[in-house]
Amino acid sequence: MGVPLAPHPDRLFPPDPADRGIARELHAAVAELPIVSPHGHVDPGLLAEDRAFGDPASLLVTPDHYVTRLLHAHGVPLERLGLTDADGAVAAAPREVWREFCAGWPLFLGTATRGWLEQELAEVLGVTEQPSADHADALFDELTARLARADMHPRALFHRFRIDALATTDDPADDLRHHRALAADPSWTGRVVPTFRPDRYLDATSPGWPAALDRLGEAAGIAIGSYDDLVAALERRRAYFAEHGATATDHSAPTPRAAFLDVADARRLFDAVRSGSGTPADATTLSEQLLGEMARMSTEDGLVMALHCGVRRNHHPGTWRRFGPDTGHDIPVHAEFTAALAPMLERFGTHPRFRTVLFTLDETVFSRELAPLAGFYPSVFVGAPWWFLDAPRAMRRARDAITETAGFFRGSGFVDDTRGFCSIPARHDTARRVDAGYLAGLVAEHVISLDDAHTVIRNWVLDAPRTAFGL
């Protein structure tokens, strides 16, 4: 018999018995509340088509770079984890991928990923024994059969997870056919909204930028030959997304710096960079100018502007060339917000229709920059710890760093930022447990009352993401 898989009911709660009792009460009050997921990467086609998940490897391993990156660090090639390279080489079969995962199960011990996986396996998939190399095949067959059941299809799980709203991340040139199909389906009662992610069309430093503009122009019905054409195309596609339920735009910019040039200067920059005669500095300035245009458009159409900064993308060029982006080798770096955001906030920081949510992987700016910015500007919200910082202890550090300056009500609520659909409830429960423990400590110290703590944790679960992201 294998090692039992049974996540402890008091996991992530404080070790002190008195604090733990308060945390239990707070968590119990929000454990069954709906999930508001304002930022993630779930494919909306899962829900539009509602096909059964084929096997556990394709569901839990291959699409999740939290999982694949750590196994890769221990010597497992990415193709052995189901990733297909640029040459179209056949990836390992799902059963082989699952064997690698089960053999590597002990390697996740101590990581946040291990906690999510344990809860996902136990509470979503009904697994009672920890994965291991010895019974990998038996577990693969058990889960493959279970995933074929109607109650394990994506729509059934969406309702079982009590998802109130789910925001996807979408290319501006996407026709949003899956969102349209869901909206037109009378049997569908959930809320799934697109998010406008224009990075490839704003990044004039990328070699693929000119080709990307052609794709955007085709979607917008505008031949993009000038700066004005590009701005018009972006405005038209934003309007299309808003018509289909979008409430936010999402930007993974190297820095949050935006430029606000005279139109004549912006036109000259565009012409130079598009023709290939511009310098790298010209391309960078044009990219910043286009980010500034996004902020200006937000004041007009009301779409919330989410900024994700402080990450070096595609750190290993060989892996990027073979397997593409989002394959586990993006690395946190230093970020600076105060000076970078000054031009944007000077113009729009108190604008009644402008709202921005600031995310970073640089913990050092939480108390030094983000909390003070959110503590003054009504348009600025601090994004929940994101990506590498969505681990329990990092979430606690963020609460400590932000709260004493910005208070409890200037944040975004938890964002799961996941491609793994079945990880959504486990990740949100992790945040609720951490927050319950954090607030329990403040109650025990008599900083806030127990009634206040109940108000705050409910706000973090429901009201904060709805307010910050316009949901």
Image (tube, rainbow, N blue to C red):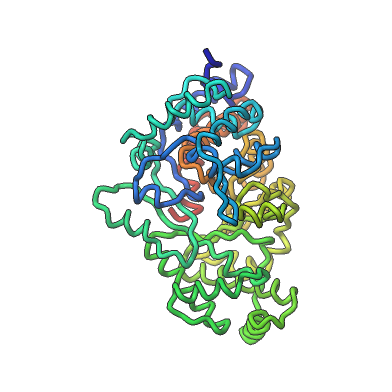
Name the residue nearer the viewer: 208 or 42: 208
Q: Position of residue 92 (x, y in %)?
A: 55, 41
Q: Is residue 130 left or right of residue 281?
A: left
Q: What is the x, y in percent for residue 451?
A: 49, 31
Q: How many marks?
A: 0
Q: Is residue 452 left or right of residue 404?
A: left
Pick the front one: 161 or 371: 161
Instruction: Identify the residue at image location x=50%, y=50%.
Output: 41
Q: Is residue 107 visible?
A: yes
Counting from the top left corner in percent of width and height, residue 248 is at 49, 59
The residue lying at 66 percent from left, 73 percent from top is 259
Whole-percent x and y of residue 380?
59, 57
Q: Is residue 214 above or below residue 166?
A: below
Q: Looking at the picture, tell me which residue is in the foreground, 91 or 143.
A: 91
Between 87 and 256, the one nearer to me in the picture? 87
Up the image or down, 403 lies above or below 184; here it is above
**Which of the 4 quarters of the picture holds residue 220?**
bottom left
